[in-house]
Amino acid sequence: MKIAITGKGGVGKTTFSSILSRMFAEDGYRVVAVDADPDANLASALGFTKEVYESIVPISEMKNFISDRTAAQTGTFNKMFKLNPKVDDIPDKYCKEYNGVKLLTLGSVDYGGSGCVCPEHVLLKRLCSHLILQNKDVVVMDMEAGIEHLGRGTAQGVDAFIVVVEPGERSIQTYRKVKQLGSDIGVKKVFVVGNKIRNKEDEEFISDNLENGDLLGFVYYSQDVVDSDRSNQSPYDINSNAKNQIRAIKNRLIQL
Ligand SMILES: Nc1ncnc2c1ncn2[C@@H]1O[C@H](COP(=O)(O)OP(=O)(O)OP(=O)(O)O)[C@@H](O)[C@H]1O
Ligand SMILES: [Mg+2]
């Protein structure tokens, strides 16, 4: 199963991605969690120690490595380079593993404008496509907020997008745009998780705004989740109702 977690800024993508990844790992799956947000913070949500996550070098910053693999200077645009760099050894060599979850941190790429091709992007895109199409593990991608980056195709070929929404019109708008973009890039299934729910009215607001069959479930607002962030613990390593609710969502996802 390969899924990409998307949605508006701050809705809970990283929290959800981390709990889901840890849960799959605890159930015995091999899991690769991909931090595809340039403002990377999935490592701490997964529970990696500060020492480890501060030592992580994102793939896009491995300049010499990228130059070797693509036969091109990083930071250049539209020059000649290999479009099919070797990537199959990257997940094992460059991920950090903790509690059964392998983490790959992609990092940020300087895009030189629309239509640009640069070695960093080619390598990341090919790495993701390898993970999505050839790798046997469960892949959970924690995406950057919004939709602008989806057109670059890092998540192309995933089985589904999960859009995390809050009970509010603005995150629903993002859901609609993801749905549109998904169909443009061939991702047919777009599911929704309603997060930070407080009551039945919140549930109804979200249900009323979705297309039939898109809803996976709700995660209620949880003070324990907020506290885990404040104390820099993984939301998976604390007791909260959110975990039970996400377990139900995971089971539904497997069914579908
Ligand atoms: N169910 C929940 N109940 C309470 N707080 C939550 C819940 N889910 C997430 N949060 C809190 O909301 C904040 C944002 O969460 P998170 O970082 O997961 O969002 P994000 O969508 O990944 O944000 P960004 O767009 O910046 O990547 C965090 O402080 C997190 O603890
Ligand atoms: Mg995030």
Image (tube, rainbow, N blue to C red):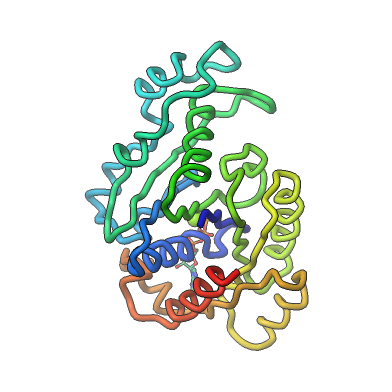
92 on left or right of 86: left
Q: Is residue 163 left or right of residue 219?
A: right
Picture quarter containing residue 57? top left
Q: Position of residue 136 (x, y in %)?
A: 43, 50
Q: Position of residue 153 (x, y in %)?
A: 62, 39
Q: Is residue 229 above or below residue 37?
A: below
- Residue that sits furthest to the top in the current view: 80
Looking at the image, which is closer to me, 99 or 203?
99
Q: Position of residue 21 (x, y in %)?
A: 41, 61
For the question of whether residue 49 can be seen, the reply is yes
Quarter of the picture containing the C terminus is bottom right
Q: Is residue 230 visible?
A: no
The residue drawn where x is 34% and y is 80% is 239
Q: Quadrant of residue 198?
A: bottom right
Q: How many marks?
A: 0
Looking at the picture, tell me which residue is in the foreground, 205 or 129: 129
Residue at (44% x, 83% y) in the render? 241
Residue at image position (50%, 78%) is: 248
Q: Residue furthest bottom?
A: 200
User: Where does residue 116 sit, x and y in percent of width and height?
Assistant: 64, 23
Residue 225 falls left or right of residue 173: left
Q: Residue at x 73, y 68 (%)?
A: 169
**Front residue of 168 and 245:** 245
The residue most toward the left is 51
Q: Quadrant of residue 46?
A: bottom left
